[in-house]
Amino acid sequence: MSLSTGPIFMSGAGHVPHGPGMTTKIIYFMVNGKLEKAEFGCDCSAADVKDLFRAAAEVEPHHVLKMYNWRGSVVNISPRLEANTPDSCYRLEAVASDLHSVPMPPELDSMEHRLNHLETKVIEDVGKTPDAIFELKSQVESFKRKLESVKHLSWMGLFKGDGNQHLPKTPLKARTPQLSVQEEHQRVRMKFLNMSSLQVTGEVRELLKTPIFDNWQWEEAEMLVLLQVMYTDLDFLTAFHIELEVLQNFLFQVYCHYNNIPFHNFQHCFCVTQMMYGLIWLTDLRNKLGRVELLIMLTSALCHDLDHPGYNNVYQINAQTDLALRYNDISPLENHHCAVAFGILSKPECNILKNLSSEQYKHIRGGMIKCILATDMARHNEILNRFKVLQPVFDFTNREHKEVLMKIMVKVSDISNEARPMEVAEPWLDCLLQEFFNQSDSEKLKGLPVTPFMDRDKVSKPSSQTNFIRFVLLPLFTELTKLFPCLEQHILEPVRRALDYYSDMERASKEVKEEEEEEEEAKPPTGGR
Ligand code: PDB
Ligand code: ZN
């Protein structure tokens, strides 16, 4: 019977022959944020199996153990536990064996202490515990039991300073039930590494090169495999001597450094990178730019919103956040995204650039900094106007021309949701508005200036989007299409269809609004004589 950590050896369906006629059972489970593997003979006693898992949880004998299966149901810890594989791992939790071992909030403890002291005093005076004190003591006891049952809500601040403040304030995405962020990351990592050796079908590979790719069909571990396919199919691993394991570590760390917020999350990162990948193939950029430029564009797209907090630069500056302070109000978010990217690349096990010359490294670093900083929409007109000047005389051998094009390509990929099929694009607008509304709610609470197009009381989704498409998207996409005419059908026409869609929605909502106002006016005046 053994417990092994570190590299997990895949052992098939979970039963390994173990000496003559004896089979052992292999159980994979998460405990304390780590994936562990237990192995025990099927003739093992229930007590021994419990001891094995208690050792894994590193708890004392009196602690209660709870085992959850991948569906989140509690299962019995016994030799009959069903064998599994790493991507359907159990989760082992040690819960306190009794109330007294759970640290209660200091207020409750001091109240109980004062109550006991008072009871002692009163008993000295009147010889017995009066009903009032007895009642107070039972209320404290029942409150402690209730508090114990909501311990998992500690991130609401019920237990001050219990170290859980870092928990996500809005557990948005339906992650695997009750897994912590770290455990979720480990689950995704195991799934990613298990799948990465599988072959992606030719059909998916071709779909990946088009703007009609639907990100909503894929979960995060699969997206990591698809990102690996992008780097592989552009021959980056051979061209830049990138070891597959280093690329996988890099991609996994990028995934870990995106936050669980409505819009600027890992799914957005994947969409932007996939659109960039599609544009590279559609415009045949592989034959017009060097592979280094392609690596800069794809990796900039991948890293362009790393560790986005869900509150934009205006908020950072007005709220005088650490980021605004650190970057002197100059594109604080984009500077941060880029710094986090190079923080990841500074780890040797994640450094996909480590086998390049320092010349190449500097060139790629410089290119990524320019491209990521270019995604600050406050600079939109500056960059687009520069491109408009160069586009008619564009020279693919001119360094400055190429730099502006790379910035434009990352910008186009970043705000390109409306170039996708409507059923893929529209949910993204809802996610973005949810993030914007969260920000304006926070601005109202803090007495900060509220950005009008983020104010849930003022924004009309269709009219905001028609304006955005008309005045931001179409001019940008039109300019790029002048350089690559084939993009007319792939991104310009879908955006024109999106403009029609939201214009119709805007007209419909205006008609409804007018009808409501007419009904309001037609109503007899209420109240008064
Ligand atoms: C932009 C800047 C920051 C973050 F606000 C996101 F209602 C975006 F008008 N971004 N990316 C895609 C968009 C889109 N902003 C809008 N529509 C998009 O499709 C504007 C819209 C949400 C508005 Cl530009
Ligand atoms: Zn973005």
Image: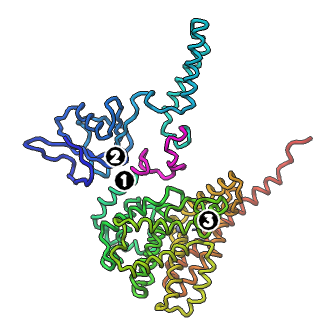
Q: Is residue 356 magenta?
A: no
Alpha carbon distance from label 1 to label 3: 32 Å
Q: To which residue does mark 3 refer?
A: 313
Front of the two marks 2 and 3:
3
Q: Main secondary structure of the magenta part?
A: loop
In the image, 28 versus 334, the foreground residue is 334
Please state which of the two labelled residues, at mark 1 or mark 3, is closer to the viewer.
3
Q: CA distance from mark 1 to mark 2?
A: 9 Å
Q: Nearer the viewer, residue 517 or 147?
A: 147
Callout 2: CB less than 8 Å from ligand 2: no
- Toward which corner of the image does residue 510 lie, by quadrant? bottom right
Residue 108 image-quadrant placement: top right
Q: Single out the residue that lies furthest toward the left.
A: 20
Q: Is mark 1 within 8 Å of ligand 2?
A: no
Q: Secondary structure at mark 1?
A: helix
Q: Earlier in the sequence, mark 1 or mark 3?
A: 1
Residue at the spot 41% in from the left edge and 75% down from the top edge: 209
Q: Amino acid at mark 1?
A: Gln
Q: Residues within 10 Å of mark 2 (few under 14, many from 20)?
A: many
Q: Residues within 10 Å of mark 3 (few under 14, many from 20)?
A: many
Of the pair 144 and 339, the residue shown nearer to us = 339
Whole-percent x and y of residue 70? 35, 46
Indicate the secondary structure of the residue bearing disc 2: strand
Q: Identity of the amino acid at label 2?
A: Met
Q: How is the image coloured?
A: rainbow
Whether label 1 touches label 2, CB < 8 Å: yes
Q: Give the residue displayed 59% in from the left and 80% down from the top.
A: 383
Question: Residue 163 at x, y = what percent?
Answer: 49, 44
Q: Which residue is mark 1?
A: 186
Q: Which residues are magenta?
A: 159-183
State the image coordinates of residue 299 (x, y, percent, origin top left).
Answer: 43, 72
